[in-house]
Image (cartoon, rainbow, N blue to C red):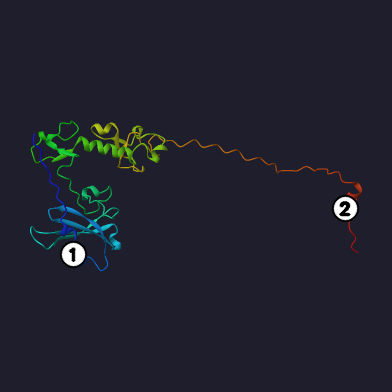
Amino acid sequence: MSRSRIRSTRADAACVAATDLARQAAEEIAGPGEVGAHLGFDNEGDRVVTHYFECLNRAYRGWRWAVTVARAARARHVTVSETVLLPGEGALLAPRWVPWHERLRPGDLGVGDLLPAQADDERLVPGYTSTSEELDRQSVFEFGLGRARVLSAIGRDRAADRWYSGQGGPNAPIAQAAPGQCGTCGFYWPLAGSLGQLFGVCANEYAPDDGRVVSADHGCGAHSEAELPSPVPEPAPPILDDTGFEPVDFGEDEGETEAATEPVNNS
């Protein structure tokens, strides 16, 4: 069994010594005083070396200038091949680019905005390929008259998880304080298909979830069978007899009483 040998080339001495040439190339691109100390070099191959210099621009902290120099075979002079600014350890980088369809969040779509579904959206399947009884079976229709795609099992499960864990599920604060669950409310209209086993639409115009999908174990204060608590009877006011009075003897002396009742002569 033969083994292939990998020949490791030594760094070209002329390219390694061309630090001044590399610095000059970096200074031609960078602003005045933005090229700092020499940070070392990498051997890129036969007579190709990349020199690194510190970037002193405060807006690019952690970045470094990379200048690649090369020397042709049997040539004496070294030339500059490429000059770029590369991030180093701890460099401030822009966040990873995210496609627009992954950046969208519920509520971002406004009036007049268009949100086309992707061709390979796993939440949708072609209508004629669906075998579920609850989905549209377009094979019984003439092609072109029905919906091109319908909800897939993945899309159905994601919607169920989203609805159940949201404001229309059993963990919402309003559901915790409800007198009853939506499944026992007369305004609860179950959905068709398998989703109807757990979800329905609220049809009470006075309920906060009117026209929204709610789970059967959700609830609110507008339950059809809700009853007001019986009022607590107030205690009767005390009855005061103010139709008469009776004299009270405080035990005063007769002399003081008579003196108090004698007329006063002012002449």
Residue in the foreground of this view, choosing between 16 and 146? 16
Any mark on residue 21, and which? 1
Measuring from the top left, give residue 137's x and y in whole percent.
14, 34
Outermost residue on the bottom side: it is 32
Disc 2 crowd rating (10 Å Cα; few below 14, some 14-19, many 20+) is few
Quadrant, the C terminus: bottom right
User: N-terminal of the two: label 1 or label 2?
Assistant: 1
Q: Secondary structure at mark 1?
A: helix
Disc 1 crowd rating (10 Å Cα; few below 14, some 14-19, many 20+) is some
Q: Residue at x 30, y 39 (%)?
A: 163
Where is mark 2, residue-wise? 260
Of tags 1 and 2, the one toward the viewer is: 1
Residue in the foreground of this view, choosing between 124 and 48? 48
Any mark on residue 248, and which? none
Q: Amino acid at mark 1?
A: Leu
Q: Is residue 219 above or below residue 61?
A: above
Q: Quadrant of residue 173?
A: top left
Q: Amino acid at mark 2?
A: Ala
Measuring from the top left, give residue 9's x and y in whole percent.
14, 50
Left or right, 164 with reference to 267: left
